[in-house]
Image (cartoon, helix red, strand yellow):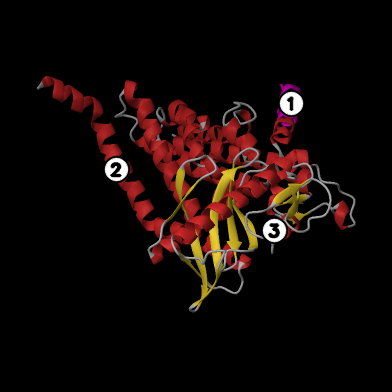
Amino acid sequence: MSKIKHFIQQSWLLIISSFFFGLLIAIASAAWSPRIEQNRINKLNTLAGRLIPEANDFVPLENLGVVIEVTSLKGDKKKVDVYKAMAGEKCFGWTINAVGSGFQDKIELVIAVDKDFKTIAGFDVLASNETPGFGDKIKEDKFQGQFKGKAVATLELIKSGEAKDNKILAISGATISSEAVVKIINHYMKEVKEEMQRKGLLGNDSE
Amino acid sequence: MTQNSESTVGIYKQTLLAGLWRENPVFRLLLGMCPTLAVTAAVKPALTMGLSVIFVLLCSNIVVSLMRNFLKPHLRILMFTLTIATFVTIADLFLKAFQPEMSETLGPYVPLIIVNCIIICRAEACASKNNLIVSVIDALGMGVGFTLTLCVLAGIRELLSTGTIFEIQIFALAEKGGWFVPWAAMSMPVGAFITLGLLLGLVNVVCKRKA
């Protein structure tokens, strides 16, 4: 009995404050989490909307009852967020959230493709931590513009020359960052396309 | 009576000024180096970080000061950490909800305020031994001192790396027909170390001259 008394004497403040602080965090989280979620959706929609300007509604495939799971660049099976770009009833393409390693931290991209999954409509950076002045040029139009209209899953990085056909010109001084972007895009385009064909969301190429 | 109240005011004033200069957390105590180096590439994130630290410091000093008579010596650090972690989580959620872009720029450095030595140092050295008013003044002095230091450092780095302050163009860029060629190195970690080192040296020289 005296042990319990001793325990309570020593720790009553800790126990009460734990409850009180827990309550405070719960209130803050309950009050703000819808807003935080909305911020995330807004950011994604703005980025995706810039890539496929014809569409005004980006529907997550989960809402349509489909879950796309592919092998990530690290080799494990992971769920990928794929959105159907719609305007009214019409489908204008797809956007895919992809992730892979960059130069010093992971790079998260939004990649947009046309509705047949044949050409890339463009990409944008959701989150990255590349070197300022070098690697972070992957956020600039000059680099991103090269991807528009390229055929899916065939990109090749070159260090000099002209960026025609399936070639992407690397950012000078940031080959690793450029390579990372090309690798992420090629990998996810191939994997997601195959998975979506298996699920019957796209026609087969041979058709 | 008058003498008494005068000396109290004197203590308040001293406490406030200590954080701003004599015991400035960054320049004199060398505390909180991690955010000082990491988020000072531009003024805006530095200011946001400073304000978050002021909020957490103020709340934790108030709570610790109020519970100082009930603290068990061997459980006090646990109580401090619990208090600080609570307010840091709230600050982090607030930034995510209302300043999403800034929250992304600051990344992990907002949750890392939990291990910022300034806050636990003030809880231990001041708030757990002093009344509420002194603790609040101490938190404001230290918090504002930290924020100002961060902003000075960030101002220098932002100006030299992009020619802007608060994203307002100060130096005309060479690529737009001006004269200033940005020093990209200043926005990288190397720029943070060099600027902080030079400022620390400068502050030391000034203090030695005074003494």
Residue B132 can be seen in this image: no
Residue placed under numbered mark 1 in the picture: B201
Q: Chain of mark 2?
A: A
Badge 3 or badge 2: first in the primary sequence: 2
Identify which residue, B29 or A69, lies in the foreground: A69
Image coordinates of residue B80 in percent, x first then y, are 39, 31
Q: Chain of mark 1?
A: B
Residue type at mark 3: give it.
Answer: Phe
Q: Chain of mark 3?
A: A
Is the residue at mark 1 from the same chain as the one at mark 3? no
Q: Residue furthest front?
A: A206
Q: Nearer the viewer, mark 3 or mark 2?
A: 3
Residue occupying image coordinates x 76% and y 38%: B185
**Start-end of magenta stretch:** B197-211
Residue occupying image coordinates x 53% and y 55%: A97
- Predominant secondary structure, magenta span: helix
Residue type at mark 1: give it.
Answer: Gly
Residue placed under numbered mark 3 in the picture: A147
Is the residue at mark 3 from the same chain as the one at mark 2? yes
**Separation of marks 1 and 3 at Cα, in angstroms:** 49 Å
Q: Residues within 10 Å of mark 1 (few under 14, many from 20)?
A: few
